[in-house]
Amino acid sequence: MKREQTYIEGSNFYHSKGRVGRHFGSYWWQNVRGRGAAPSSLCAMRILDRYIFREILYPFLIALVALTFVAFLAFSREIGWLLELIVRQSATFRDIWAISIAYIPNVLTFTIPMAVLVGILTGFGRMSSDSEAIAFRATGISMVRLLAPVLSLGILAFVANLAMTVWIAPQTAARLRDVRYEFLARQVSLEVKPRVFNESLTNFVLYVQNIAREGFNWQGILWADMSQPDEIRVTFARSGAVTKDEEHRTFALTLTDGSTHVVSPRSPHRYSYDTFDTTTLSVPMPQAPTKQDKIVISEMPTAALWNAMKAGTATYEERVEFHRRFALPFACLIFTLAGLPLGVSTTRGSKSMGLVLSLILMLLYYLVFVGGTRIASNAQFSPFLGAWLPNLAFAALGTLLIARSNREHDNRLLNSLASIMRWFSEKRAEARTTRKRLRQWTYSLTHHPKFFRLLDAYVLRGFWFFFTLVLVAFVALFILVTLFELLPDIVKNKVESATVITYFVYLLPQILYYVIPLTVLLAILIDLGTLTKTNEILAVKAGAVSLYRMAMPLLLMGLLLSAGIYFLQDFMLPYANQLQDEYHDIIKGRAPQTYRDPQRKWMAGSGERIYHYNYFDPDQDVFGGISIFGFKPNSFELTEWMFATRATWDGAMWKFEDGWTRRIGTGGSVDYQPFTSLEVRELDRPDYFKKEVRTAAQMTYPELKRYVTSLKQSGFDVSGLMVDLYRKLSFPLVSFIMAIIGIPFSFTTGKKGAFYGIGLCLAVGIFYWSMFEFFDKLGGINRLSPFVAAWFPNLIFGFGGIWMMLRVKT
């Protein structure tokens, strides 16, 4: 029998049948069936272990950074609040670190297992595409032997994740409430928005007309006390300042130049009126924690959960939380068993399969995990099985695949997936050949008669493949992060699955708005980086085709996606955000906040008026229990208070029934006039009360522009709104600028490896996003002009990308 040999020479694997792979060490060995032993097989296997460990470590680290960054986008509100603290110089570096470290462990608890799976499948997918899996089998290396370096990474990730879930995450979550209070005490104005009625305070309503740039001085203040059912106490003041009350853990609101008015709805003739130069009110901030607050389950120490389970006093929610903290870290080990046989394949061209399988397995695992936890919360399923079911299922799958691989069976799961993808490609090609070709509509730079030629289609096919893959991965991760954040509330409030699904349907446009720009950058880097690595870019240049011409379809796709983001921002987000906020309140166990004025109770009128009512029927145009406050525009001094039990609209005027009017004179005199019927023409029409009250994110560009113009004419500070207005034009262009940046990066880093390019991509994307948000906050407090704050990051990165593109050797 002819002796077969496998050895290494230079930088290549060699077998008796020819070159089969790349070099992973400087040692050679022969097949055990031939004569002659390896000079140092133990040393060679150690080198092999280090080589495999390094090949899966790099994609693991890059995936961990990417997944963690995208996961942090789910906490965009908290990050925005944190950046505002920084730009207002209300927090030191130590303070910022204290808040950041409180969020990181909760995110890492499930991004670490994801990164382990991505690292294994991507690393071995690369080795399989270069035929190194053939070299492993040819040298007699079993699948169990390959498991050693993979398991090393899994054990390290398991230990780190276990520390996060069992010890670090509960402690940091408990500490976060106290840290947030400390910052809230320093910067209370961050939670109070101008010209918005804050009705979240129990039995109190706070309204501020304007807030100074430094944030602590307020102008035009209304404070309504509804705590007593038999009286209404309303205070108007010209200005006020906020200070901290350490003893009661509240905020003291010191008012200047104001008056307090008290009236009884049942006895309108009873009325008291006091003026003051200075007075102090206690404001109970809703987010300020107290010692009496009940600790949530996610903040309970693991030892306390264990003691409650031993004593038999643990609730279902506590038992589910206990098993969840241990089951999730074990996913790092389970993914090594399932990922290794799926990643090792002798099929060439399976390099992209690692990403596809990573996405599929991650979705399956976490969906089963959440589903089991949800079922267990209804007391219909064992909490142990609810948390450990996905681990048991994936462990069985991994063991089966490893056993079949050792018997040298083909990987049927990978082959089936590849067959499905080939089938779709064939059907798409058949449909393309039968479709009528489009007429010529423009000429390319090389003056060929069709713009989208074969080269353009080839480049765009790779771009859209990676774009779709990365986008689905990012969207799935965003949803998973949000789902895990809301899982305690879903379990506690027994929220229906239909409500949760509906919430994520309306949240999807916002997710796409966040992740599409970074997805464009990643897709271009992977697509062109792969073409550079395989020397296809060199072949294009050899065919006398400029790289600028080759990159043109990618630039057009970036511009097209920018237009799509603007469409998404102006025609979908304003309405989807309102609905997802309502469902978010339902999941949190709060009454859903409505944006229709008929249910808002308080409303600022078009003139110097403020309305308060108990009921409004928008169909019949009827008010019930309406009060109208008139005040002076400069001093915010109350001049008139009108009340009526009922008000109707007859098409031309308002008709008030059974009420009274009190007019406050300059000398403190009060003119009281009761009435049974009164007609008034100068008030706002019914349509004014039917319009929606929305934030800048819930308005289209024309609506926000009209709103800013109206406030500016009234003399209000609109710096923050101007930044939001300019940002509605600047942010959609981020996708196009990402394309400009990604193209030169791909051409210059392709030979250094795809992971090097992706790493640079993440660094650029994270820095770009951080810079965009940071300048947004600077513009909001007038440290920069609104135009500069909204457009400066785009200009810097745009011109930087153009400069890099001009330096590319075409």
Image: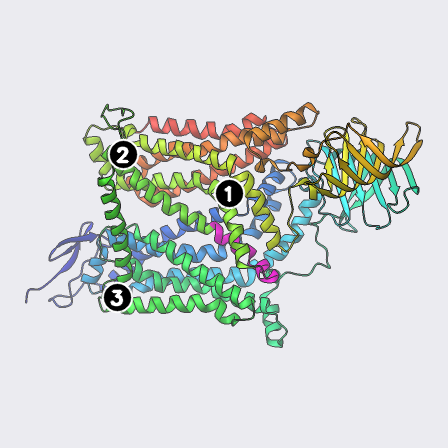
Identity, as a three-letter code, of the amino acid under mark 2: Asp
Q: Is residue 519 above or below residue 651?
A: below
Image x and y of residue 535, in percent: 22, 39
Q: Secondary structure at mark 2?
A: helix
Looking at the rendered structure, which numbered label has been put on residue 456? Answer: 2
**How far across and down, in percent of the image, does residue 97 sit?**
58, 47
Mark 3, other Cα within 10 Å: few <14 / some 14–19 / many ≥20? some
Pick whichever of labels 2 and 1 is earlier in the sequence.
2
Q: Nearer the viewer, residue 201 or 699?
A: 699
Based on the picture, tell me whether residue 481 belongs to the magenta stretch: yes
Determine the image quadrant of residue 150: bottom left
Residue at x 91% of width, y 41% of height: 271
Residue 405, label in figure: 3
Residue at 77 percent of width and 33 percent of height: 654
Query: How far is the residue under mark 3 from the one under mark 2?
Result: 40 Å
Bounds of the magenta segment: 478-495
**Residue 211 figure quarter:** top right
- Can residue 604 be seen by looking at this rendering? yes
Report whether 652 appears left or right of 514.
right
Residue that protrudes farthest toward the left in the picture: 1
The quarter of the image holding the C terminus is top left
Identified at 86% across, 49% down, the residue is 230
Q: Are marks 1 and 3 in contact (CB under 8 Å)?
A: no
Three-letter code, disc 1: Gln
Judge by depth and name the residue closer to the eye, 34 or 396. 396
Position in image of residue 479 (x %, y %):
48, 51
Q: Please tell me the numbered disc located at residue 510.
A: 1
